[in-house]
Amino acid sequence: MYKKKPKDPPPGSPAWMTTYSDLVTQLLCFFVMMFALSTISETKYEQLATSLRSALGGSPGVLQGGDHILGEQLPFDPSPHISEEFYEVYEEILEKLDEEGVGTAVEIYSEERGMIISFKEKIFFQLGSAELLPEARNLLLKVGEVLAADDHQIRVEGHTCDLPIRTAAFPTNWELSTARATNVTRFLIDEVRIAPERLGAAGYAEFRPITPNTSEEDRARNRRVDILLLSSNTF
């Protein structure tokens, strides 16, 4: 009798092997990530978390180059957020911030005008005050060392949230934001010895928020002093 020839197996790997390979690959990625997180500092973990939240939410955050996330030095790879013009000073400022352990209270990002170092109100001032806190002075001295050795023009910009203020010293947020920017500028001149001709100060009250004032967390982000290093192409 004629025996029917058995069918050849379909080409390629069996379906179960493909699924198994995907599972093994995902497990490997998971354990590599766990190992990486086990060696990261608390400050860098907070910065990484902020960067991820900012990327997903479309707002600026603490931007770390790839050579900072795991604490190892890799060849320079220009970041889409920090241009090569500012990368050296960016690296030096990151070292100072890491030494101070400021975590997410400071954000660094770029815009068309240049690179911004954004200091949250809580580490610089009491609510409704323009007097620098002692820890702010120490932090400004450390960051100022880097700025003094650099040659970019600097603009200090004060910002508030949308909560109104009406005091004898500050009738509106315009006066408060301007006083804060001016006090930081004076400190950089008097204590850090940065040349006055490199500096400028401005206050913008609540009118240039980086996020909508829809919660106290968002308002806290908007209450800030930005130190802007102007790009050489900005006049």
Image (tube, helix red, strand yellow):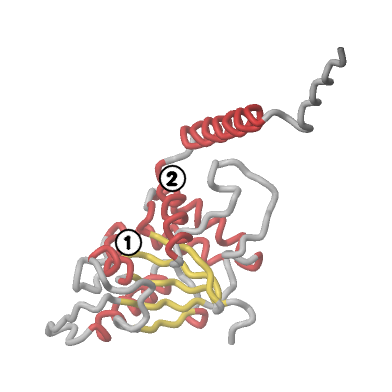
Q: Earlier in the sequence, mark 1 or mark 2?
A: 2
Disc 2 target residue: 45
Q: Label 1 sits on what residue type?
A: Ala
Q: Which quarter shows the C terminus?
A: bottom right
Q: Which quarter shows the N terminus?
A: top right
Q: Position of residue 175 (x, y in %)?
A: 25, 85
**Which picture quadrant has residue 70?**
top right
Question: Which mark is drawn over residue 118?
Answer: none
Nearer mark to the viewer, of 1 and 2: 2
- Horizontal arrangement in the rendering, residue 150 relative to residue 172 (left or right): right
Whole-Å distance between the Cαs marked 1 and 2? Answer: 22 Å
Q: Position of residue 180 (x, y in %)?
A: 30, 76
- Does 8 appear above or below 194? above
In the image shown, does 144 or 43 lie closer to the viewer?
Answer: 43
* Residue at horizontal 47 percent and vertical 37 percent from the top: 37
Residue closest to the far top: 1
**Which picture quadrant has residue 22?**
top right
Q: Position of residue 146 (x, y in %)?
A: 52, 61
* Residue at horizontal 79 percent and vertical 25 percent from the top: 7
Q: Label 2 sits on what residue type?
A: Tyr
Disc 1 target residue: 136
* Residue at horizontal 56 percent and vertical 78 percent from the top: 112
In the image shown, does 206 or 196 lie closer to the viewer?
Answer: 206
